Image (tube, helix red, strand yellow):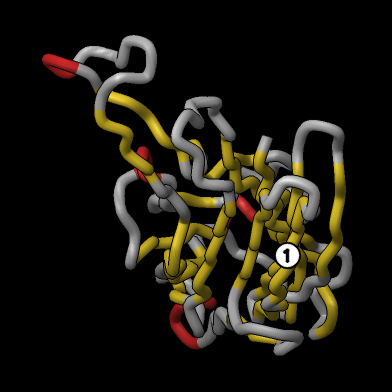
Amino acid sequence: MRGGSRNRWHRAAMTAAAALAACAALPAHAVITIVTDTGSSYGLTLRVGSPGTTVDTVAFSVTGANAGLTPTAVTGSPSITVWVTPVRPVSTNNTIARPVTLRVDSSVALACQSGGCGSAIIPFSKISWTASGNDNAASGDIQNGSFDGSANQTIASYNANASFCVGLLGLPCVLGVGTWTYQSRQLASTTLLFSYANDTVYPGGTYTGTVRFTASME
């Protein structure tokens, strides 16, 4: 998968973006992007794949019987690990929600690059993933899924680093009297193993495309 990075700022949100590319030979860019609000110690880190500017390649090889009358799904290699790490100041009274969302843009299909496939394209909805090293969706980790071919697909969401107060009998605190708990949530080291459905016969050749991952904290 191929990709790059970009930073975007909004008045009430911070966003980090990175790109991953895919193909039936599929290349992937691993990018680390850090967005920091230096005025209030808020920050957001998004990393997809290897650190630095290393370019990873996820390849799906459709050959032999898989390209003929008895096609079966093809697993890509290698797998890709995704991190989204929000930074939020510790506070004794920080109950304001700061939603973190990880989205993907797979709206531009994989296009023929070589091998005689002409103008044929393969939609990204033909590619799915199995997530490992993850927790449940409520904790913010990516679950098993597939690209839906849209520009704004949410694949993980949670509330970043919230602190809350519990009073007597488990009821909310009154006048701040009770026990404060600092709750840290982040998507850490969720590894995605990609699979190409291979349920449609396309002209033989090499196809490439790019998926863009965007993490935001409101």
Q: Position of residue 45 (x, y in %)?
A: 65, 62
Residue holding disc 1: 34
Q: Nearer the viewer, residue 164 or 71?
A: 164
Does residue 218 appear left or right of residue 187 in this picture?
right
| Residue 150 versus residue 113 in the image, above or below | above
- Quarter holding residue 49: bottom right
Res. 182 visible in picture: yes
Does residue 155 appear left or right of residue 114 in this picture?
left
| Residue 137 versus residue 38 in the image, above or below | above
Q: Position of residue 82 (x, y in %)?
A: 53, 66
Q: Nearer the viewer, residue 126 or 87?
A: 87
Residue plotted at (37% across, 43% down)? 183
Res. 204 visible in picture: no
Q: Nearer the viewer, residue 55 or 200?
A: 55
Amino acid type, label 1? Ile
- Quarter of the picture containing the N terminus is bottom right
Could you say whether the residue bearing mark 1 is in a helix, strand or loop? strand
- Quarter holding residue 129: bottom left
- Quarter holding residue 60: bottom right
Q: Position of residue 91 (x, y in %)?
A: 50, 39
- Quarter of the picture containing the C terminus is top right
Residue plotted at (49% across, 61% down)? 197
Residue plotted at (86% across, 61% down)? 6
